[in-house]
Image: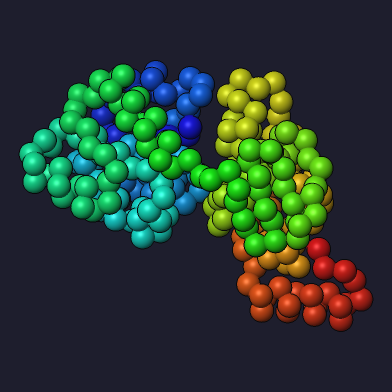
Amino acid sequence: MHIGILEDDSAQQELYKLWFNTPPHSCQCYGTTKGFVDALQKERFDLLLIDWMLPDGSGDVVLKWVREHLGWELPVIFITSRDSEVDVVTALRAGADDYVVKPPKYHDLLARIESQARRATPPSLLKFGAYEVDQERRGITVGGKAVELTQKEFELACYMLQSPGKLLSRVHLLEKLWGLNANVDTRTVDTHVSRIRRKLEIGPEHGWQIIPVYGWGYRIEKVGVGEAADKRGKSAKAGKAPV
């Protein structure tokens, strides 16, 4: 589980890194609301830990942004020294999934994270337009036709399809899918993205497109029906197949 943490106390950040930067978890810590929100627009997290009082704002404002822009599926746990009943109720009503009073205890916090992870676990069968992902059997079909993929190709396709509109860096994909200490470089990511694009025929005709972002990584986006038809029309006029 990849955890995004908003905490301005450097000692507490180091403690979180010690706790959650070992498999099966990883984490990134941010000390300001601006840095945290910027990261949320570029990187996909499985769960967020948010402090309330920050140097440049407050956690409840960040929580509101998360719910408005990232939806209600992403689990959020507030961790703060504010312990009044009013504060707890305010955070929960604003969209927090859980509330922990500082100082957090490792086993208690880990249990709460695991509980939220179970709640957020997607069903075994997922549909993304023409793509159907069977996580239990580890297979993907396109328009009902099964596609043969390697394990890493399957994992990469699943992860990207569940992150529409997110800018996913090569380094993040490498760490998330190959592990923090994997003896591979970012070219491996490029190779696998190219393979899943070809094998799954990812393009406007199937309602999706993968956009490379120079010097950074990739973003997968849904393509509207009208936009897909327009692209096919332009390709036909140019005398070439759409890509």
Nearer to me, 98 or 45? 98
The image quadrant of residue 51 is: top left
- Horizontal side of residue 242 vs 117, given as left or right: right
Query: Residue 14 at x, y = what percent?
Result: 35, 21
Q: Quadrant of the C terminus?
A: bottom right
Nearer to me, 147 or 160? 147
Residue at left 19%, top 28%? Answer: 102
The image quadrant of residue 81 is: top left
Query: Residue 84 at x, y = what percent?
Result: 7, 39
- Horizontal side of residue 92 vs 140, given as left or right: left
- Asked if residue 26 is positioned above or below residue 153 in the image, the reply reads above
Nearer to me, 58 or 64? 64
- Asked if residue 187 is positioned above or below residue 231 in the image, the reply reads above
- Horizontal side of residue 206 vs 30, given as left or right: right
Residue at left 12%, top 37%? Answer: 82
Query: Residue 189 at x, y = what percent?
Result: 71, 38
Coloration of the structure image: rainbow
Residue at left 34%, top 25%? Answer: 111
Residue ranking furthest to the right: 239
Q: How many marks?
A: 0
